[in-house]
Image: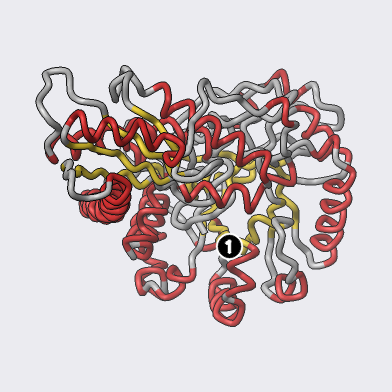
Amino acid sequence: MEKALNESETTIPAQGDTRATEQVPTEDIGGGAISALFDGSEVITPPSTSSVPTPSGQVPCYRDEGETIHGMLAVNRSLAVLFVDASTLADIEHDYGAAIYEQVRAILTNLILDMRGVETRRDDLVTVSEDHGDTFLIFLSKKREERPFGHGDLETMADRIHEYLTRRLTRMTSSYLRRRLKLGIGYSLVLYNPLINSDRLVLQLIEEARRMAEIQDYRLSVKSKEVLQEIILKEDVRTVFQPILDLRSRKTLGYEGLTRGPQGTEVESPYMLFDIATEAELVFELDRLCRRNAIISAAELKPHHKLFVNLLPTTIRDPEFQGEQMLSFLKENNLAPSRIVLEITERLAIENYDLFLEAMKTFTDLGFEVAIDDMGAGYSGLEKIVHLKPRYLKFDLMMVRDIDTSFVKREMLKAIHSLAQNVGADVIAEGIERVEELETLVELGIPYGQGFLFARPKPRFIEVPAVEHRIVNEVPGLIVD
């Protein structure tokens, strides 16, 4: 799968975490596949309750504001509501626990409250559908010019709020959600009728807004698919390269090709790009484009360097990546199979084991090497992994994070390192960000590594000795030129 690099993405720091959260062009994806894991993203530790932000105002349940809502309906002769469905955030509670979920929910609550006077009116009534819930109902007060809301006004406002909340909340949840953040924003309008119970009118209003949120979600999905189709047709992706370092000699083993979408857009993030592709059933088309672009962009790669390319099950079935057609394409770009390392995640290798076992033999017979990515990420098919005869085992970046302070992570890496030695493979540690992590890896005898400590992904090939020279030289055990 493609791998998302998110090492300096803006996230919610755990208590006591003083590392910078500078926002960079978010995640990077390997030259043709997707991954649920982020290269360099944090291992999430639930914060103490004291670190959870308190909403800047209490948000009541709409049922507790019945009198106010009925009054707005009667006085204005109509009532409009915006329906904000953030129920996808429940995945965070399931994966990381209630403390992290409440932290994210509090941030969303503050964003919605802070919209008043900016995207909505200060007098608008912000409520939730249920106490401690993640669906918000914003009852709109009358417009300034005293003209009632029309459906065109509401649709424009819903689109604007969707962009406002998604842009801000995505930066804060990208390390928690393993897919694209989806907010459903619906709207509805009900007219006052003294013959109908006001509670019934309000329930009708909320139900219609909920249905409209579903319609708006579909509309946005179609627009996203159209954007992706245009990107694929125009081949509007670019490849950046991150060096993989020999920790013993400080020389560059090779580069991993990572994909980014159009610069300055939402889909510059490959995590977003491939999430849309999955929903739109365009993964094969996007993966093929990314893989081709990575190989073409690597035409100037020095002869002694390897190119690491991510692999999907669809890659194996792609006729362009088979036989003489594939070999000719590589030759046109000054590459040979012996310089290509095909990366597949541990999870995909196990889930598609029979398919990959047969395909990998074909590729390795041609001279390709194989790397198993995200080792230690929670899967345990080590016996099957051994039969794939990998040349490299890439230790999961979330296990590298703070390995200098974790006995369990060090023991896991020792076990994987021992396995690698027994099957003739080498370990590559991913997502190295701190000197202390690097020191620990060197002490454990890990031969290779990559991460922001050495270099961020760049469109050109960076010679490692020129990157962070002073920091690398200070690490005990490294050989310095």
Residue 179 percent location from the top left of the image: 48, 51
Which residue sits at x=81%, y=32%?
478
Picture layout, residue 66 above or below residue 361: above
Circle count? 1
Q: From this viewpoint, is residue 300 visible?
A: no
Residue 67 percent location from the top left of the image: 37, 34
Residue 363 percent location from the top left of the image: 54, 72
Q: From this viewpoint, is residue 244 visible?
A: yes
Tell me: 458 left or right of 481.
left
Give the residue at the far front of this rendering: 195
Within 10 Å of the Cα at label 1, are there few (<14), some (14-19), or many (20+) other Cα atoms? many
Residue 347 percent location from the top left of the image: 62, 65
Residue that badge 1 annotates: 344
The answer to which image quadrant residue 72 occupies is top left
Which residue sits at x=57%, y=59%?
343
Q: Which amino acid does label 1 sit on?
A: Ile
Which residue sits at x=16%, y=42%?
191
Which residue sits at x=18%, y=23%?
143
Query: Please, what secondary structure does the residue beneath circle 1 have?
Result: strand
Tell me: 394 left or right of 312.
right
Q: Pick the residue in front: 262 or 166.
A: 166
Tell me: 97 left or right of 229.
right
The answer to which image quadrant residue 390 occupies is bottom right
Q: Pick the residue in front: 58 or 162.
A: 58
Picture layout, residue 303 above or below residue 404: below
Picture layout, residue 72 above or below residue 386: above
Quarter of the picture containing the C terminus is: top right
Tell me: 133 left or right of 425.
left
